[in-house]
Image (spheres, helix red, strand yellow):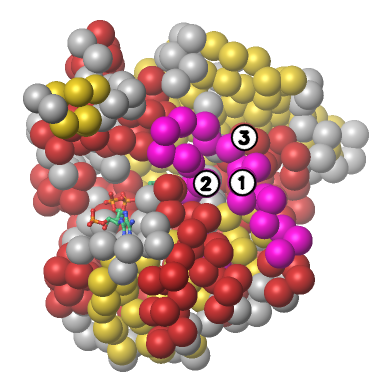
Amino acid sequence: MAKVMIIGAGGVSNVVVHKCAQNADVFEEILLASRTKSKCDAIKESVKNTKSKITTAQVNADNTEELVKLINEFKPELVINVALPYQDLTIMDACLETGVHYLDTANYEPPEVPKFEYKWQWAYKEKFEKAGLTAVLGSGFDPGVTGVFCAYAQKHYFDEIDYIDILDANGGDHGYPFATNFNPEINIREITANGRYYKNGEWLETQPLEFKREFTFDQIGEKDMYLLYHEELESLSKNIEGVKQIRFWMTFSQNYINHLTVLQNVGMTSIEPINFEGKMIQPLQFLKAVLPDPASLGPRTKGKTNIGCIIRGRKDGQEKKYYVYNVCDHQEAYSEVGSQAISYTTGVPAMIGAMMILKGLWKKPGVYNVEEFDPDPFMDELNKQGLPWQVDFSPVIPE
Ligand code: NDP
């Protein structure tokens, strides 16, 4: 039984709070703190029938001193960071200062340069080791479950892993001409950046959305998917020993790409500040303000997501293929916790990662990515907590 502090009150936080509250034997007390306290209160109100004690607070997570004060008042064992990637370092600093474990779902990003690199957070390894504290990075779905899937394959099915393809399909339809399923700023930054993948010890770059493949996803059907850079490629290329190639694919409809192309062509996806009537604004942040709030998509979204890893390599001298994936239904997720599948598939693994730390199963001083821990108890919890996984031993390979 433990006390946790959850920072951020968006779509993912809503799921984390609901799932922690469903596991009140582990998460006895929850402090939900974010920039806008009314959003914390609304999440708290929406949680019914729980034995967890939930309180709320206002905090600016860009400010380490404010965080330290709040952490010292509440004295949690762990901070779950589901604010934005910009707050990762200030929150890690506050955890170090107060002696509290740390977990997040997205790597630190400086606001002015979209980088998707772990170097800033990995640099905290020694500090966490010395403090005897555990920091778990990227415990969402991708990064997160995808890393655990790879660790599980390595532990049980392969002597050597050669190739990993991570496939992320969203077959959901929200009925709007254009909207992003999670924070639009982060989503658009990811898609408009050059593609990149790992091959034979090198990083190969592509133009944005240059590589396209068709793939038939279980329970969704045929979709176009595009090669993107995604942050788990960096940690998996280090942590899956001997891997030759890792690629990440995400599905987008032609309609989504058409809208994005126009927005890009007119400069609306830029993060370069511009002077608008005497005020400096970032076009991408302005765009975020006019797009539908991802949280509002929940009740409207129908269909499923399918995210998983196709892994190829060898076991006992034999060539092996292994595809492990989860299918999540937007409407089922919404009826359970009031958020669609994108937030659900991120929030459930964040809760499970937190549970792993609190139960002592994933506790080791330092800063780690999820694939560096024992995958078995995490995989068991996925099946129990709403994200069951399936396996195909003869998948089609996206050549
Ligand atoms: P939202 O934008 O819906 O929510 C972010 C929340 O953080 C908001 O409540 C916001 O406050 C709060 N926040 C922002 N800045 C601060 C600050 N300075 N101090 C305190 N609170 C702050 O995002 P999501 O819920 O969709 O995503 C949350 C995280 O999950 C992001 O880091 C995202 O990158 C990550 N993610 C990871 C995925 C994975 O699979 N690994 C997939 C999807 C998302 P306010 O309400 O005032 O704006």
Question: Across the whole image, how many numbered discs are drawn on residues?
Answer: 3
Residue placed under numbered mark 2 in the picture: 107
Dot 3 crowding, Cα within 10 Å, few <14, some 14–19, many 20+: many
Question: Circle 2 sits in a helix, a strand or a loop, which is it?
Answer: loop
Which amino acid, mark 1?
Trp
| Between marks 1 and 3 in the image, the one whose residue lies nearer the viewer | 1
Tell me the distance, in whole angstroms, between the alpha carbons under discs 1 and 3: 16 Å
Write down the quadrant of residue 118 in the picture.
Answer: top right
Tell me the distance, in whole angstroms, between the alpha carbons under discs 1 and 2: 9 Å
Dot 2 crowding, Cα within 10 Å, few <14, some 14–19, many 20+: many
Question: What residue is rendered at 31% in x and 69% in y?
Answer: 59
Q: Nearer the viewer, residue 321 or 282?
A: 282
Question: Circle 1 sits in a helix, a strand or a loop, which is it?
Answer: helix
Q: Which of 64 and 315 is in front in this view?
A: 64
Which amino acid, mark 2?
Asn
Marked residue nearer the N-terminal end (3 or 2):
2
CB-based contact (under 8 Å), mark 1 and mark 3: no
Tell me the distance, in whole angstroms, between the alpha carbons under discs 3 and 2: 12 Å
Can residue 278 be seen at all in this image of the molecule? yes
Question: What residue is rendered at 43% in x and 14% in y?
Answer: 209
Is 110 contained in the magenta span?
A: yes
